Image (cartoon, coloured by chain):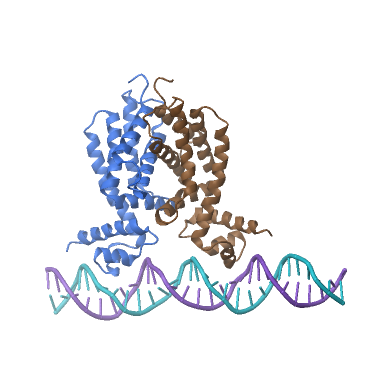
Chain colours: A blue, B brown, C cyan, D purple
Amino acid sequence: MRISDKHQKIIDAAVNVFAEKGFFNARISDIARQAGVADGTIYLYFNNKYDILISLFEEEIGKIILEVKKLIEKEEDPRRMLEIFIAQHLGLVRRRKSLAEVLQMELRQSNKFMREYRNTKFIEYIDIISAIIRKGQEMGVFRPEVKPGIAKRAIFGAIDECARLWILNPDTTYDINETAAQVSRIFLAGLEQPSVQ
Amino acid sequence: MRISDKHQKIIDAAVNVFAEKGFFNARISDIARQAGVADGTIYLYFNNKYDILISLFEEEIGKIILEVKKLIEKEEDPRRMLEIFIAQHLGLVRRRKSLAEVLQMELRQSNKFMREYRNTKFIEYIDIISAIIRKGQEMGVFRPEVKPGIAKRAIFGAIDECARLWILNPDTTYDINETAAQVSRIFLAGLEQPSVQ
DNA sequence: ATAAAATGAATGAACGTTCATTTACTGACA
DNA sequence: TGTCAGTAAATGAACGTTCATTCATTTTAT
């Protein structure tokens, strides 16, 4: 069995366990059982419990960034790029619910409590949004007075909160596609130059 | 010493300790020390550790709701109401940073892990936004195709994410007033009827 | 045969909660 | 006014459980 196999198996198990119980309520033995390894084995691949979480972030967000960047690169129109980013993020919530839960909840915890850990991958992810906005401003499509550094937070926060609702309550709320469409419309209307129409 | 004194003292201490260490890393003895009471005294006022957190939510969000509703009631223009809500929420982050931190981080945790606890106070808070939007739609100021149930989440998520950034990094980021102004502008432009200007 | 990988029982520190004891308060009575 | 019984409030040491981590031993691969 290749090293990477067990490494990934533990990560995958951790995603499920953290999603279900949260980081602090998750036991190493839970992760071990779900990964099909012994408790001690986990310490051959990770330094400690927190290290599992950090590795999980780095590796899984890394993959997501690659995917969404690939999709966006094909486009010319920044409006379309923003739509794609929003749809992709919300789509991820449906396709990989557990991962989305962990990234959303535990990533924030870690951001806050591990002062030394600067989550560069996460920053890279939301900087995709500000890059789109800057491009739109250069092309004269988006209003120049909008600050990309603020708008990226607003947009990310909006879709993430919608995702959170859907994670908590998948049935009783709006359909994900409809949510993506609505949020896209609000922000596009909010960003576009009035002259362009 | 009146009962309410110690009750409130423990709540206040818990706000600080939870903000600094997070719920799971906070020890009862930390809260007790900061409140100036013995560990056991806490259990005369609260059933258990989680009960402190829940009481804290209910009571403190309750006060915030009253404040912001009072401010909004005075206004006629839904655009102005939305501006006030946004400014008020972000202002709270500056004025009561620890409380904002706890509400932001731990409230979500609880929402997720305490299945039985429906956080009605929080719902009441963000429903202020949807009420504003509905009013604006009735007056023909906001676009009718916007769903208030989605827009309220998007708006709350946007300001909350901006707040989060500011909590994590008070110095290196944009000024809170500027953030409030930018976010208000984006959403107002995103919600307004094109015919109205 | 040797090394590398994996195991899982044992360890020990951490900490929420309890409860036997102490302290503070109240008002009745001389 | 001072004493004291009765009650409520507060205390904090001790308890018991939980669980991350370790490491002596076993299994697997070469």
- The spot of residue B113 in percent (x, y) is 40, 56
Query: In x, y percent, where is residue A24?
Result: 40, 60
**Percent from the top left, x then y, of residue A177?**
29, 38
**Residue A13 in picture, x, y percent from top left:** 27, 60
Residue found at x 53% / y 53%: B56
Closer-to-camera residue (B107/B136): B136
Residue A189 visible in the shown view: yes
Q: Is residue C26 left or right of residue B111?
A: right
For residue B164, above or below residue B23: above
- Placement of the C terminus of chain A among the 4 image quadrants: top left
Q: Which residue occupies 36% across, 23% down? A: A193
Q: Is residue B1 above or below residue C18?
A: above
Closest to the observer, A123 or D2: D2
Any part of residue A44 in sight: no
Which image quadrant for residue A31?
A: bottom left
Name the residue nearer the viewer: B76 or C1: B76
Please determine whether, in this image, residue D27 is positioned above or below residue B76.
below
State the quadrant of the N terminus of chain A. bottom left
Up-down: is A76 above or below B39? above
Q: Could you tell me which residue is drawn at 49 percent across and 29 percent down?
A: B78
Q: How many marks?
A: 0
Residue at 46% from the left image edge and 60% from the top image edge = B25
